[in-house]
Amino acid sequence: MKKILLVITMLYAAAAFAAADVNKSSAAELEGIKGIGPSLSEKIVEERKSGEFKDWGDFVKRVGGVGGKTAAKFSDEGLTVNGKKFKADAKDAKPAGAKADEKASKKKAASPKAAASATK
């Protein structure tokens, strides 16, 4: 009896974290992903009628309201595009302070002193 309960519990746990692919899942299955409600699932299904999503970039581009951070969260919850999880590209993967550091170094390079020493 304990073994049967264990198997049922394991099946229930697996079903709770069932993956959903944007190209194959119904609106109801998409809504099983935390953060996807009826409105967003309908957007996904409607946009899919124009053609399957090629990859995560295509998905983010075509579905309004979904950006890189949201795509990463959906992927963590089990959403896939053609069976693949979301991977941030290099520009999305930079730490929050990296842009400020990058701007400061560009500004320093463009300063008059830097320009004068570069022409000598």
Image (cartoon, helix red, strand yellow):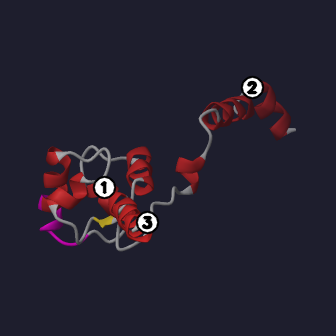
Relative to 4, say whether 32 is above or below.
above
Seen from the viewer's position, the closer of residues 66 and 41 is 41
Labelled disc at residue 112 = 2
Q: Residue at x 31, y 55 (%)?
A: 61
Relative to residue 37, is residue 105 drawn left or right? Answer: right
Relative to residue 32, is residue 116 drawn left or right? Answer: right
Relative to 81, say whether 106 is above or below.
above
Seen from the viewer's position, the closer of residues 103 and 14 is 14
Tell me where residue 55 appears, x and y as whole percent: 37, 68
Relative to 111, say whether 66 is above or below.
below
Q: Pointer 2: residues within 10 angstroms few (<14), some, or many (20+)?
A: few
The verdict on residue 50 being magenta is: yes
Tell me where residue 93 appears, x and y as whole percent: 58, 49
Q: Which residue is drawn at 32% across and 72% down?
A: 54
Kind of residue at disc 1: Lys
Where is mark 3, residue-wise? 2
**Which element is circle 3 on?**
helix
**Disc 2 or disc 3, which is closer to the eye?**
3
Report the span colored magenta: 46-52
Labelled disc at residue 61 = 1
Tell me where residue 118 appears, x and y as whole percent: 82, 39
Pointer 2 or 3: first along the chain: 3
Pointer 1 or 2: first along the chain: 1
- Find residue 112 and report its image quarter: top right
Seen from the viewer's position, the closer of residues 69 and 116 is 69
- Find residue 47 and report its image quarter: bottom left
Q: Pointer 3: residues within 10 angstroms few (<14), some, or many (20+)?
A: few
Assign the N terminus to one quadrant of the image.
Answer: bottom left
**Disc 1 or disc 2, which is closer to the eye?**
1
